[in-house]
Amino acid sequence: MDNNIKKHLHDIDESIDSIENYLGQERNFNTYINCKMLRRAVERELEIIGEAMNKIDKIMPDIFLSSKKQIIGMRNRVIHAYDKIDNEIIWGIIVRHLPILKEEIKKLLCE
């Protein structure tokens, strides 16, 4: 596997770990909504994940990442349409997509 791909995979893995650390074990949506700093930190990590996925897609589009389009789309929305961010959609990505993505990234890094 190309070293650039590995770097981007590590970046994604690190950002997922950061989001998990920011949210803690509770993962409480109300806590998330009521803390602007937490929301902004998570949004920044999603930007990094989306950008890394976009770069991977350009280098090697056949790498399967199940939520690639949704996360790249969210990255674009966070960057270009910050005033239209839907916290429930972000929360859905955190709860539904990131755990699966984390497993996919770990498998790819072990190859």
Image: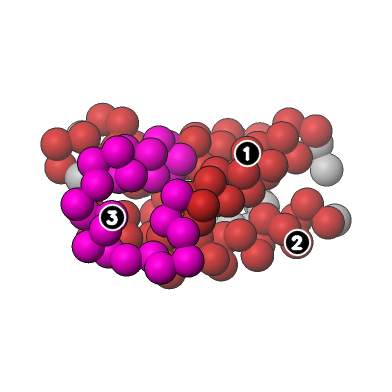
- Say which mark, if any, is on residue 67: none
Q: For this rendering, which residue is in front, 31 or 59?
A: 31
Say whether residue 98 is left or right of residue 92. right
In the picture of the structure, the residue carrying the numbered disc 3 is: 32
Q: Secondary structure at mark 1?
A: helix
Amino acid type indicated by mark 2: Lys
Q: Where 33 falls versus 37 (above or below)?
A: below
Q: Bin the neighbour count of mark 3 within 10 Å (Cα to Cα): few under 14, some 14-19, many 20 and up.
A: some
| Rendering coords of residue 84 (x, y %) | 15, 42
Amino acid type indicated by mark 1: Asp
Q: CA separation, marks 1 and 3?
A: 23 Å
- Say which mark, if any, is on residue 107: 2
Amino acid type indicated by mark 3: Tyr
Query: Residue at coordinates 66% horizontally, 62% vertically from top-left?
Result: 104
Q: Nearer the viewer, mark 3 or mark 2?
A: 3
Query: Residue at coordinates 42% horizontally, 56% vertically from top-left?
Result: 23
- Which residues are the magenta region? 22-47
Q: Main secondary structure of the magenta part?
A: helix
Q: Bin the neighbour count of mark 2 within 10 Å (Cα to Cα): few under 14, some 14-19, many 20 and up.
A: few
| Rendering coords of residue 12 (x, y %) | 59, 44
**Whether label 2 touches label 1, CB < 8 Å:** no
Q: Nearer the viewer, mark 1 or mark 3?
A: 3
Q: Quadrant location of residue 102?
A: bottom right
In the picture of the structure, the residue carrying the numbered disc 1 is: 11
Q: Bin the neighbour count of mark 1 within 10 Å (Cα to Cα): few under 14, some 14-19, many 20 and up.
A: some
For the image, the number of numbered tags is 3
Q: For this rendering, which residue is in front, 99 or 56?
A: 99
Q: Secondary structure at mark 2?
A: helix
Q: CA separation, marks 2 and 1?
A: 15 Å
